[in-house]
Amino acid sequence: EVFIGTAAVFFNMQTRRRREMLRRALRKVGVPERSWRQARATLMEAWHRREISNFEYLMELNTLSGRTYNDLNQYPVFPWVLSDYHSETLNLADPAVYRDLSRPMGAQVASQREVVRRTFDEFCDPDIPRFHYGSHFSTAGFVLYYLLRVEPFTAHHKVLQGGRFDHADRLFHSLASTFEGCTHSSSDVKELIPELFYLPDMLLNRNGLSLG
């Protein structure tokens, strides 16, 4: 991915050889290549000094790790931060209102941690390595789940579902129920996307879609 001002050009190279050829060509014309170690150190210093926001810091980490808005399968990931989606007011000084960032979504609840441990311990297949979760925290389907109400993601969602919307009870309609599902299932452990922190339109059905 090459950044030009506020725009970005995303190259999908089919082989490593072609990728290296492109990198050499870009270096020849003076396009700088970011160093992960150097950029990370500079980024952390800026964050520690509060020169950049938490949002900017996380977006830069996503970019440095190869995630991009230009690829649904490598879309930027943001964490669930809160755990209370039912109270009318929140005391942000109370640790209980936050999710445990030291654990993945599938291990927030003690009973669910036992489920994934048992899954790992009991799984036995000569061809498939053991695993805790049968899903990933970020996929193209999860991005379309969240951005269902905003084009062009509406159209992409319908293509994924064979030309129609998914069943109404499986569509994104509530942060509370989505959080509950992600913390009580080993097959749904998705995190969030950046738009949930700046794009209120994704929560509104401005296009009058028939979502059931």
Image: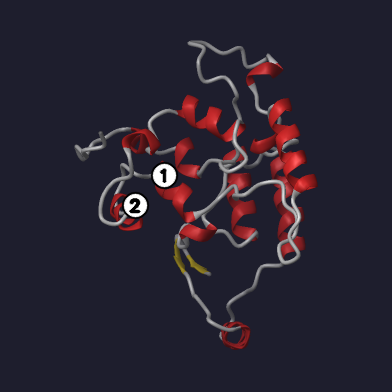
16 lies above or below 144 = below
Q: Amino acid at mark 1?
A: Tyr
Between residue 58 and residue 41, name the one nearer to us.
58
In the rendered view, tell whether residue 49 sits above or below residue 39: above
Image point 71% across, 62% down: which residue?
A: 128
Residue in the picture at 70% in, 51% down: 43
Give the residue at the far right of this rendering.
121
Q: Nearer the viewer, residue 53 or 104?
A: 104
Q: Describe residue 59's horizontal placement relative to residue 111 as left or right.
A: left
Crowding at mark 2 (Cα within 10 Å: few <14, some 14-19, many 20+): many
Q: Residue at x 73, y 33 (%)?
A: 113
Residue 109 horizontal side relative to residue 84, left or right: right
Q: Answer with the quarter of the image where residue 205 lies.
A: top left
Q: Is residue 78 above or below residue 11?
A: above
- Mark 2 vs mark 1, CA separation in Å: 8 Å
What quarter of the picture does the C terminus occupy?
top left
The dot on residue 38 is none
2 and 1 marks in contact (CB < 8 Å): yes
Q: Which residue is mark 1?
A: 145
* Amino acid type at image mark 2: His
Color encoding of the figure: secondary structure
Depth check: give the residue in front, 2 or 168: 168
Instruction: Say what secondary structure mark 1 lies in.
Output: helix
Horizontal and vertical percent position of residue 26: 57, 83
Percent of width and height locating residue 160: 36, 56
86 on left or right of 168 = right
- Mark found first going from the N terminus, 2 or 1: 1
Q: Could you say whether the residue bearing mark 2 is in a helix, strand or loop? A: helix
Q: Which residue is mark 2?
A: 157
Q: Residue at x 46, y 37 (%)?
A: 196
